[in-house]
Image (cartoon, helix red, strand yellow):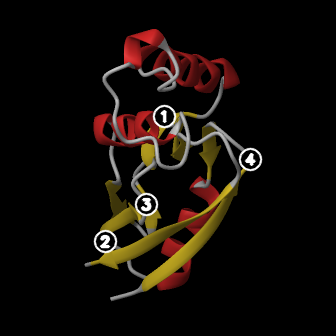
Amino acid sequence: MPQSTLTLSTSGPGLYEFTDRVAAFVRGAGTETGVVTVFVRHTSCSLVIQENADPDVRRDLDAFFRRLVPPSTDPSMRWVVHTTEGPDDMPAHIKAALTAVSLSIPVSGGRMVLGTWQGIYLFEHRDSPHRREVVLHLGA
């Protein structure tokens, strides 16, 4: 069963689309029917399938999660104990817990069965740049 690891570089919070890289992996595997699993190997970022036509969707999602879980320096977050790597540390873990660290996408005819406007995104929750590893696995 084909497997690969992608490295994605981020420059701060936001959604980073990498649908094309997953599609290339699926095409290269030569499997007609199956499921591709996309798994991120980190606890302070996550994965989402989201609209890829209007960039306002990505901006609004990022803004929503910033309001939902502000930095630990915000008065509403006084209860946070884990701040080892800064005020965005525990909030990043919370955001990752609220979203997904793995996705399963059907493959048919050698292609992912995504909707017209669906894209695969790494959702970075940390303020500083990171290199993130995403494992792809295609099962028949």
Q: CA distance from mark 3 to mark 2?
A: 29 Å
Res. 115 visible in picture: no
The residue at which mark 1 appears reads as 50
- Asked if the residues shown at circle 1 and circle 3 are in contact, with their CB atoms under 8 angstroms apart, the answer is no
27 on left or right of 75: right
Amino acid residing under circle 1: Gln
Name the N-terminal-most of marks 2 and 1. Answer: 2
14 on left or right of 46: right
Closer to us: 59 or 33:
59
Closer to us: 108 or 68:
68
Marks 1, 3: nearer the viewer: 3
Q: Which numbered disc covers residue 42?
A: 3
Name the N-terminal-most of marks 2 and 4. Answer: 4
Q: CA distance from mark 2 to mark 1?
A: 23 Å
Crowding around mark 2 (Cα neighbors within 10 Å: few <14, some 14 to 19, many 20+) is: some
The residue at which mark 4 appears reads as 11
Mark 2: secondary structure: loop
Amino acid residing under circle 2: Thr
The quarter of the picture where the N terminus appears is bottom left
Name the N-terminal-most of marks 3 and 4. Answer: 4
Mark 1: secondary structure: strand
Mark 3: secondary structure: loop
Relative image position of residue 134 (x, y in whole percent):
49, 67
- Asked if the residues shown at circle 3 and circle 2 are in contact, with their CB atoms under 8 angstroms apart, the answer is no
**Vertically, is 123 above or below 70?**
below
Relative image position of residue 121 (x, y in whole percent):
54, 46
Q: Which numbered disc covers residue 33?
A: 2
Residue plotted at (49% across, 72% down) = 26
Mark 4: secondary structure: loop
